[in-house]
Amino acid sequence: MIPGPTNVPWRVLQAMARPIANHRGEEFHRLYNEIQEGLKYAFRTKGDVLPLTASGTGAAECAISNFVNEGSKVLIPVNGEFAERIATSVERVGGKPVRMEIPYGKAPTTELVKQAIDLNKGIDSFFLVHNETSTGVTSRDLKEMAGLCRREGILVVVDAISDLCGEEIENDDWGVNVCFTASQKCLAAPPGLSLISVDEGAWKRVEERKAESRSFYFDLARIRKYHERSEIPFTPAVPLFYALSEALKLLKEEGYETRLERHRTCGQALYSALDALGLEAYPMDVRYRSNTVLVLKVPEGIDNSRLRGYMKEKHGVVISDGMGKLRGLTFRIGCMGIVSRREITLTLTALEGALRIQGWRIEAGKAAAALESTFDR
Amino acid sequence: MIPGPTNVPWRVLQAMARPIANHRGEEFHRLYNEIQEGLKYAFRTKGDVLPLTASGTGAAECAISNFVNEGSKVLIPVNGEFAERIATSVERVGGKPVRMEIPYGKAPTTELVKQAIDLNKGIDSFFLVHNETSTGVTSRDLKEMAGLCRREGILVVVDAISDLCGEEIENDDWGVNVCFTASQKCLAAPPGLSLISVDEGAWKRVEERKAESRSFYFDLARIRKYHERSEIPFTPAVPLFYALSEALKLLKEEGYETRLERHRTCGQALYSALDALGLEAYPMDVRYRSNTVLVLKVPEGIDNSRLRGYMKEKHGVVISDGMGKLRGLTFRIGCMGIVSRREITLTLTALEGALRIQGWRIEAGKAAAALESTFDR
């Protein structure tokens, strides 16, 4: 129950134990096309979705090294560790990040984005971390923000690493130009691949770019050429492609809407149970609380690592420490991929036990009842 | 029999079908340390060997973005497609490639490297593609070149993607500072990981670097910090780590020297058989012919794609077209990983058949006899 890698279904794991196809042959072409179709479904786009042999941070680097030119201004709401990293990476390739400092635990609003655009002339692109894995905040106003940016001619790039297919993101309908995620989150495939969607507007930027991408490995112009023949410029992680293909079939079988709803129900059930236990979510505003990564404050008198240690040893349930500035002060529960009532129930039981042995006062049955009432609603 | 991905033993494939370990937990730490030990053995080094979730080109990009600074002069013998790519990538990060143009099919000599160093003052680093997968040439004078560079204070970086553990490379003994390879070649693991060794001299360069690495994903300073606690900054491709660990166990069981000898015998047997068939290797000088990637000229009157098509359809033996400038003009046979007399024999039979149906005159039994005599020597 960490915020990724998440549990991978046996069907998906088994898919990897197959001889490695030649990545320049027909068998791979078929696999690539199958995956392409599944990714379009997951990304809610008719555009291209490119698989990269790299983890999510690699996809962020791909977006940055292709869409940020020397000196170009990039608007970035900074409300967590991952947004910080994007700002840093933008600087490294010679771009100028315009940082919108948002208190950790809060989400940027469309109004704030509008102000920032008015105040800083010549913004070239807008990079948003849709779900901040470090704070448990989902930026639920993406639709409006994207609309605003599009009207201003600003490219919209969305980091949806920890919530694509877990929270609603309608890339084409909302006008998102570029969106990326990683295989090991809500898609429930093993880690090692990331996926990046590029729409027509974004391809135009690639075509009009004066300098070549700083990165050769992540150069979208080159990747596009191979994409057109269902290949990848460099040797892909073939077993992970087998697994992703299977994971996308599972997504199709379940249905996109059902998967979103399942994440919502599991997330909301867990929040209500944690509330009944007297725990406090790190994000204050209920509207922006992530359903895929739950970040909880460690209450006074509770030892964070002892709490997690007990859950792991006695119940086999692994959750994570806080991250970056929030390390030690929070713990994080991943609620993504193939989570169901079963996993949520086990997690709650483990957490309740871990709190109890540290003297936390718990009203018997209250949290479980909160869980039940959400699931049976 | 393509030049990678190569055949992966069943034991290694099976290792992937296991639940994904938490990459911040003890189970992963143990796995990481096991792999570290195996990699030191494979790389012939006491230094650090860092696994990257990226294919071989990603490792090249890692080396370039960490060891090439704005304006720094990089000496590169250019004798094939992969050396060309390195020169291009050096330019992209703002470095100045000093290109030693070597005719395709030939290897750079120590004398030429010496001349280039004398002619171009202030060379900062030397990047050598040890085994050119596009031409089938192994730069067998690395030991002398590395010694020369070290005496001049030039950093030695070696691309051993297609021959580490297939051709002799003694990194520590020869004074190579940085060396990288990919998982799917002579290590016979699935594709998707690359490995880069960094010795003390190279770490010093990282420490003394004024600007940060252009790449965030491949930033060695950050990777080193996590390496010290047996972790990786970004989510690693865990199943590929399971597989690599198993592949390294197989290497240890076989023994480094035996693996080199096996590659040598298989390569030499195949060359002698191909010679008996009247085929010509692309590299002229016997001394520099690669044992891991055999590049053969397509003889007049023979249709390259029909040849490869027949081998695949009738014998299930897949070989590759030529690459880059040599596409169409050559074909390539990979001889790496878990190759043995069995695979070489099957390949020869398939190739002989493919030539025969196109009217190539073959003296019955001659090639097979050449093969036998090498194996039974």
Image (cartoon, coloured by chain):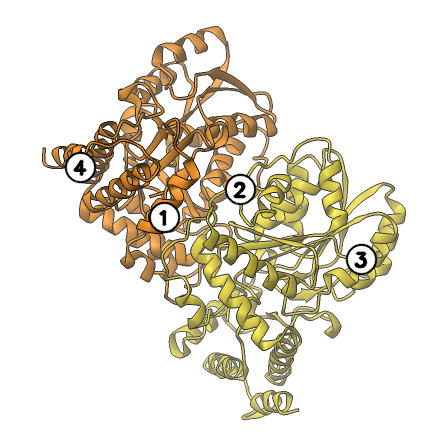
Chain colours: A yellow, B orange
Q: Which residue is mark 3?
A: A146
Q: Chain of mark 3?
A: A
B345 vs A372: above or below: above
Q: Which residue is mark 4?
A: B368
Q: Earlier in the sequence, mark 3 or mark 2?
A: 3
Real-space Cα separation, disc 1 to disc 4, in angstroms: 20 Å
Q: Position of residue B37 (x, y in %)?
A: 29, 46
Q: Which residue is mark 1?
A: B312
Q: Earlier in the sequence, mark 1 or mark 4?
A: 1
Q: Position of residue A276 (x, y in %)?
A: 62, 85
User: Label 3's element?
Assistant: helix
Which one is in front, B207 or A216?
Answer: A216
Q: Which numbered marker is on residue A233?
A: 2
A302 vs B321: above or below: below
Q: Decide: marks 4, 2 in contact (CB < 8 A)?
A: no
**Residue positioned most to the front:** B359
Which one is in front, B12 or A70?
Answer: B12
Residue A160 visible in rendering: yes
Q: Decide: marks 1, 4 in contact (CB < 8 A)?
A: no
A9 vs B102: above or below: below
Real-space Cα separation, disc 3 to disc 1, in angstroms: 50 Å
Q: Position of residue B73 (x, y in %)?
A: 53, 18
Q: Amino acid at mark 1?
A: Lys
Real-space Cα separation, disc 3 to disc 2, in angstroms: 31 Å
